[in-house]
Structure formats: C-alpha cells, structure tokens
Amino acid sequence: MPIYLDGHSTTPLAPEAMEAMAPWWHAQVGNPPSPHLSGMLASQAVENARSELASLIGSDPQELVFTSGATEANNIAIRGTALAALEGGVDRRDIVVSAIEHKSVLSSANSLRRAGFRVIEAPVNMHGVVDISELERLVGNETLLVSVMAVNNEVGSIQPLGDVVRIARSGGALVHVDAAQALGKVPFNCTDFDLVSLSSHKMYGPMGIGALFVSSAAHLRPLPVLFGGGQEAGIRPGTVPTPLVVGFGTAAKVSSAQLAADAAHSAGLSAVFLEELRSRQVQFIENIPAGQRVPGSLSLRFPGNDALSIIARAADRIAISEGSACTSGQITASHVLLAMGYTQNQAAETVRIYFSRYNGEADAADAAAALTEIVGR
Ligand code: PMP
C-alpha cells in the first residue's frame, strides 16, 4: 500500500478503538434505550464514550449530542439555530462565517438565505487566518451566529478563536466552532463556545460518527433538523450506533492520554520531510508558516507543477491530496486557497499532507524521495 499522508481527509482507526468496538458488532447486541440487560449494557457503553469525549474537550457529558459526523453537526448548529431564532422570536438575521469554512458550514448557512437570513463571509489573510479587524467590523447587533472553524481542513491553519469569541460576545451573538480538524491534533477546550462540531474519523476513530456540543449556557439552543424517536435529547433522533460511539469514545480516551506526544511526533515527521526535500534541492513554498498550522500538517506549493498530476504520478507510492475540489468532473480551484489570495494557477500547484500518529520516519524520507522524482530539483 502507498504511504498514507492524507490525515486531513481521514485518519487510520486506532487499534485500541478497533478492539473496543469489536464485541459491539455481534456478541454484545443491544439498542441503547431497550428495556433489557442488552439495552442497558449498550446504554452504559454509550454513556462511557460520551464521558470520554466530554473529558477530551472539557464539556459536561450531557452537553454532547452524537451525530453521523461533523457535516450533520454543522447542519444542526447552523440550520437548527436559525430555526430556533425564527420560532423563538429572535429577530437577528446575520450569520457571519469565515470564507474558508468547510462546505457543510457554508452550504448550511447559504441554504438559509431563502428564509431571510444574510450570510456574511469574513475574509482571511494569506496564511489562512481569519481577519480579526474585518470580523470586528462585520459582527454587530444583527448577528445571530458567528461560525469560525478551529483548524482549516485544506491548509491546517489555526484560527484565533479567543478573538472570535470576544467579538461575537460583544455583538451578543452565539459562537459555533467546527473543530473537526482540531481534535486529536491540537488541545481543544469547548468552554467558551455555544456550539462545537466534532468528527471521529479525523481523530483516529471510526467513520460515520461525530458529535455536536451544545453548551448548557447557550441563550438559544438549536432545534432539530430531523424528526424521529427523540434520541439524543431530541436534537438528533435515530438509533445511536453503539459500536461507532464506543470507537469514538475510545479514540477520545487515547487522544486525551497522548495528544502532546502525537503532536510532537507529527511535527517531527513533517520537519524531517521538509528537510529531506530541501537537501534534495526541491523547489517548494510552504503556504502556512510553522507555528500557524497544526503539527504534522503541510500545505505546499510546487511552482510549475500541477498538484493533480503530482498526486496521480505519486499515487502508487504516497497518498496525498490537493487543494482543489473536483465537482461533477469539473476541477475548480479550492475556495480556501482563492480566499487566501492565491491565483487559480497557484492554487492548482498546492498539495496537502498530514503526518499522523501511525507514520514513521521512513515514511517521511520515502515520501520526500518519491516527490523529488516527480517534481524534479
Ligand atoms: N468540517 C471540517 C473542517 C472537515 O474537515 C470535515 C471533513 N472533511 C467536515 C467538517 C465533515 O466531517 P464528516 O466527514 O465527519 O461529516
């Protein structure tokens, strides 16, 4: 198999999570609310996992709602909050987002235009960091919600959430943070926010499970966007998938224990990789300076080389990805890189790489050798 370096897309499942999930697929059958021992055991396992996740982000377990992933959490956070405003007589109609949010945030917000909401995009600087003075100008007493991600998924840039909270609070707005790319990569505490979206498969847990943190202190709680059996406090109905939740909880427990070690490991590997590229005289530009990106994450531009062609030619040796999104066969430049001020051509020269907990030094050296052969010196 090629060396996997695409951890912003998804991370390998932690063996601890795989082991913890195993019995819940067959031997330990049970739907959490069922009124028999099997149901009770499943329910206990779900609540243990909720506590593990809560302790990773500093929340109360009861403030966490399991969802199918961060996409769904973002939809509930944004559309559910707008619905709560409409039904609760709150007349604020501005939703302020950063220009580099994930599509599940941008599209959720834009879907509300029809219902009379105004979506305002705050610009970012050339290093993929939201412009705080612009945000200050855009947030006011019409703002219902400010949504800024903790870490960008395409370039790994870390956002100044302390300033975002200060600005949102001064305008009386709620704060939503998409923390899908922060968990398991950098320390993250939810205390200052109203809503936080989480994804398991970006932090060595299984795919298909995530969570929304809804602060007990929030002055407006999102309404559900799905209706059903009332699970997860009615905010996200549907059978809670015990095996996935157990895997997510275990991944959270492992992350709590080794976050600092993981970060040092990932940062070390990306440094080895860059050093190898430099020693081989490969021409490249780091889009995000060290210190402003999550450890292990690299957004690199190889001038004169098309990222998609690099990725295709490297495909049998390394799995890396590009800063462009391919929609219905049309290659369009990444909205993130364009928002950072890159031209279409510069955006098309950018690849993203992430060194995970499970990569080793040989991976960093071999990946650098493979890229050198492809892009030349
Ligand atoms: N937000 C961000 C920042 C992401 O990187 C992703 C996944 N690419 C999502 C949301 C969606 O997460 P999920 O796959 O759990 O739906």
Image (cartoon, helix red, strand yellow):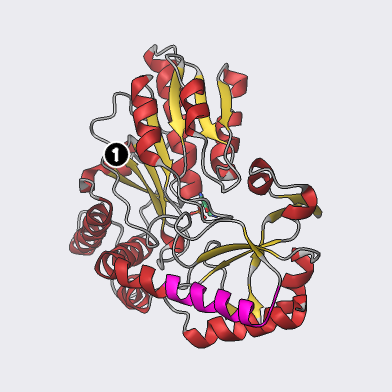
Q: Say what secondary structure mark 1 lies in.
A: helix
Magenta-highlighted stretch: main secondary structure? helix
Magenta residues? 266-282
| Residue 140 on image: x %, y % | 44, 17
Q: Is residue 262 above or below residue 93?
A: below
Q: Is residue 170 above or below residue 226?
A: above
Between residues 231 and 115, which one lies in front from this camera angle? 115
Taking the spot 58% from the left edge, 41% from the top edge, the residue there is 125
Within-10-Å neighbours for mark 1: few <14, some 14–19, many 20+:
few
Taking the spot 32% from the left edge, 37% from the top edge, the residue there is 193
| Residue 131 on image: x %, y % | 52, 35
- Amino acid type of the residue tagged 1 in the rendering: Ala
Total numbered badges shown on the rendered structure: 1
| Residue 374 on image: x %, y % | 76, 79
Q: Is residue 243 above or below residue 191?
A: below
| Residue that numbered label 1 is attached to | 233
Say if the magenta span includes residue 286. Answer: no
| Residue 201 on image: x %, y % | 45, 63
